[in-house]
Image (tube, rainbow, N blue to C red):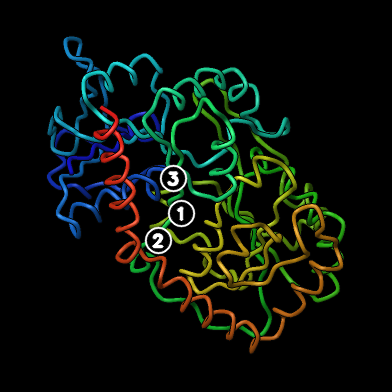
Amino acid sequence: MRILFDASALDRPAVADDAVEDARLPESAPVHYRLALPCDALRILGGHDAVLAGRLRSDPASGRLVGEGPGGRIVEDAEIVVLQGFVPAERVLRARRAGQVVVCDVTDTPEVPETSMYYPLVEAMRPAVLAMYHAADALTVSSAYLERYFAASRACPPVHLVRNAVALERWGPGEPIRTRPTIGWCGTLLERADDLAVLRPWLGAFVERHDLHVVHVGDGAMGVPGWVRTPPSFAEAAHVDPGRVERRAVRAFADYLVTRPWHGIDVQLVPLTDHHYSRGKSCLKGLESAAQGIPFVASPHEEYRWLGCGHLAGSDLAHQPAAAWIAALERTLDPAERRTMVERARARVASEDISVRWRDWERTYATILRERRGAR
């Protein structure tokens, strides 16, 4: 198959003198997990002609989507074009009429909580984004909730579930199991302020009682040009003594992989509120925790139940009381329990490595291509 993955709306363009496909690391997590990883694996392991484009345009004569990959390679003959960022629906339809199969890859619901800094932008763009999805040949999604969410709409094309994979070798070995754990939370309050409502009633007292410290990865301003905001601190939002919180700056995904900002975290917290946006999330933070040998305690989200490692606090997102969180986290205070959690997580996450999982993308794209050809 000839597959063009488009990162132009999400990532910085590849520089003209890039000599190889992996000459640069993606700036954003969606590009890394949903585009770059499967692209590289399909090319290297599957022998497919797969390219990650840093620029995308429509051919004015044919309407085909044309991408520019590393080294300035121009890709005009892609059979399948995979989009994550926004492309107007009319351009998608023109490409399809020209014979290309267009797939929209979706990792979030097209609605976010009003507390998200991106709420005004998402609401303004939602009609156009949904029109793009409806114009495509198929959607690929990263969670079972998203599969049901979009499949419920008669206007949507076929929806295929392809969960995230990880490249374990990029994360390196885990750290030693320490006697007294440091608690971590990775996220930005500008996007996930609601989630801290899960922690706020109990976390401050918990860390005082057990004399613990917390690391927040994702502190500081963020946004897009013309729309940059600075949130309150994690300590303020979670009602934790600021003297017990280490603040680590928000960073691009390329830096995230290189600098290992989770260093020194012994237990990761993954709180999620009961909202469409949270229900649509994948278990990515759990995968990343497992890949780094970090035990985690998560909300009882569907995808974390599917992952099957880590401790879950409660029965479902609507029922995750403070007592359940406290009980789950207290179990991790025991170094032996954390060692067992790490061993189980490593065994589990091995089956989610891209060297195994790339075939899911291959099968999905082959199915979409076959169905499109059969419909002609």
Asked which secondary structure carries label 3, the reply is strand
The residue singled out by tag 3 in the image is 160
Name the image quarter holding residue 368.
top left
Mark 3: give few (<14), some (14-19) or many (20+) Cα within 10 Å. many
Amino acid type for the residue under numbered disc 3: His
The image position of residue 68, as x and y in percent, is: 19, 30
In the picture of the structure, the residue carrying the numbered disc 2 is: 166
Q: Amino acid at mark 2?
A: Val
Asked which secondary structure carries label 2, the reply is loop
Eye-nearest disc, 2 or 3: 3
Q: CA distance from mark 3 to mark 1?
A: 10 Å
Compared to residue 76, the image places residue 323 above or below, namely: below
Of the 4 image quadrants, the one containing the N terminus is top left
**In the rendering, at what x and y percent does residue 129 appear?**
50, 23
Mark 1 lies on a secondary structure that is loop
Q: Picture quarter containing residue 354?
A: bottom left
Q: Is residue 258 left or right of residue 261?
A: left
Real-space Cα separation, disc 2 to disc 3, in angstroms: 19 Å
For residue 163, the mark is: 1
Q: Quadrant of residue 295?
A: bottom right
- Considering every residue shown, the one lying at the far top of the view is 61
